[in-house]
Amino acid sequence: MEITEVTISLREEDKLKGFANITFDNQFVVRGLKIIQGLKGFFIAMPSRKRNDGTFRDIAHPITAGFRDMMEKVVLDKYWEVVKQVPETSTVEAAEDYF
């Protein structure tokens, strides 16, 4: 399975840095992945829905760690590509901080 498109929508919140949509094989899209800045760096969070008991459950998620790693790399690479286009006055951290 190949990720054929990634779109990023930037946010400038403390931890939430953006949303991503990913398309697989030009046939299936997953919308609403979150790009989060955590204590140990950036990561993606899968789209989720709040349950009646107040907890959240992923709507879609990768089954294997390897596929999750691949998705995260592709999404974060695209994020940094988009961030480089943001004016320097932005509060979004420089792409070099990712590496």
Image: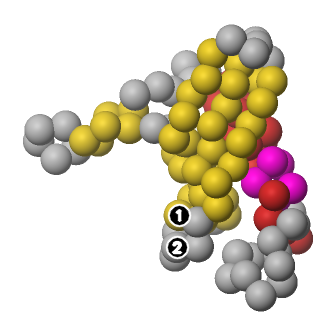
Identify the residue at image location x=53%, y=64%. 16
Q: Which quarter of the rendered picture does the C terminus lie within?
A: bottom right
Pick the residue in front: 7 or 45: 7
* Region rendered in magenta: 77-81
Identify the element where label 1 is drawn: strand
- Rounded to the nearest whole Å, what is the CA distance between mark 1 and mark 2? 5 Å
Q: Which residue is mark 1?
A: 16
Residue sitting at 63 percent across and 16 percent down? 28
In the figure, 29 relative to 34: above or below?
above
Q: Is residue 38 visible?
A: no
Image coordinates of residue 20 in percent, x first then y, are 63, 44
Identity, as a three-letter code, of the amino acid under mark 1: Leu
- Which residue position is annotated with label 2? 13
Residue 89: x percent and y percent? 77, 88
Residue 91: give x, y in percent of width and height: 68, 82
Contact (Cβ within 8 Å) of mark 1 with mark 2: yes
Q: Quadrant of residue 64?
A: top right
Q: Residue furthest left?
A: 53
